[in-house]
Image (tube, rainbow, N blue to C red):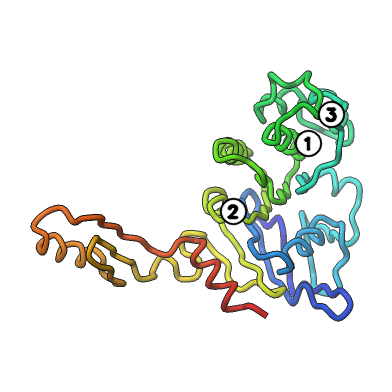
Amino acid sequence: MTTAVSVRGLTKRYGAVEAVRGIDLEIRSGEVFALLGPNGAGKSTTVEILEGYRRRDGGEVRVLDTDPGRPTRPWRSRLGIVPQDAADVAEASVRETVRHFAGFYPRPNDPDQVIEQVGLTDKAGTRVRKLSGGQRRRLDVALGVIGRPEVLFLDEPTTGFDPKARRAFWELIRNLEDTTIVLTTHYLEEAEELADRVAVIAGGRIVAEGDPRTLGGRANAKATVTWADGEELTDTPTKTVAELIRHYDGEIPELRVTRPTLEDVYLRLIEENAS
């Protein structure tokens, strides 16, 4: 597979503070890659460098085979960016806004098709200020994809969404074929649902990277078996459950078998690498 984003030894300093300390990354074309980390960990700085909006102090960075430190207009037209706080276009309608942004790109998607894709067809004539929070975020995504981007940056895309709106947004992102997506989110469930791979940033460094299902040894971690009268941490939960069945001679009261969640692994990694 081709590489959409390549980072080697990335560093960034703000005065005496080293915000990014030697990050290495490789994001494959077409995958969804999530960057996770607490506020101040360096993930926003890293993404802004990838987008070409912040200069790095050291390291090598290539996005679509171009150094974002020397951005060009044709290169920017190949990117889509959905920031956490979008610009205010409150008095324009949804259709007017999408058509306006389409004019910035050399080969944009059809505005009406994009509006349909994000589920806003029935709101196409509505002024942006009258949209709900979830509808406004869908418009943000429409503006992010109108230019037919090869790489799409999504910064906390579902902040403030209710559960129904969040799941509808996830389905929208899954339908963006042939687009490399770089996602930053504080919702660990969101990363697990959408990302092919995740990287955890703490103290300006990547402390873990991989499939969210196996990150940090998660797949091989001990399971916790709990029931009404007790709890056991074990490598062989099936054996434990079988023994409990014999003990109770049937149904085990309040039986639960769990392994560490992505959130459990994430919190452990952050705690272990706290500066």
Amino acid at pointer 3: Thr
Residue 50 place in picture, x, y as percent? 79, 59
Residue 143, which numbered label? 1
Q: Which of marks 2 and 3 is nearer the N terminus?
A: 3
Spatial CA span between label 1 and label 3: 8 Å
Closer mark to the observer between disc 1 and disc 2? 2
Quarter of the picture holding the C terminus: bottom right
* Image point (85%, 47%), residue name: 76
Q: Is mark 2 on a helix, strand or loop?
A: loop
Residue 140 place in picture, x, y as percent? 75, 38
Spatial CA span between label 2 and label 3: 29 Å
Relative side of 211 to 247, left or right: right
Q: Are marks 2 and 3 in contact (CB under 8 Å)?
A: no
* Image point (59%, 53%), residue name: 187
Give above or below for 10 relative to 117. below
Q: Do the residues labelled 1 and 3 touch (CB within 8 Å)?
A: yes
Relative side of 237 to 101, left or right: left
Relative side of 13 to 193, left or right: right
Q: Pointer 2: what residue?
A: 187
Spatial CA span between label 1 and label 2: 23 Å
Q: How crowded is mark 2: few (under 14 residues within 10 Å), some or many (20 or more)?
A: few
Q: Which of marks 1 and 2 is nearer the N terminus?
A: 1
Residue 90 place in picture, x, y as percent? 85, 31
Quarter of the picture holding the N terminus: bottom right
* Image point (78%, 46%), residue name: 81
Residue farthest front in this picture:
229
Q: What element carries label 1?
A: helix
Q: Pointer 3: what residue?
A: 97
Amino acid at pointer 2: Tyr
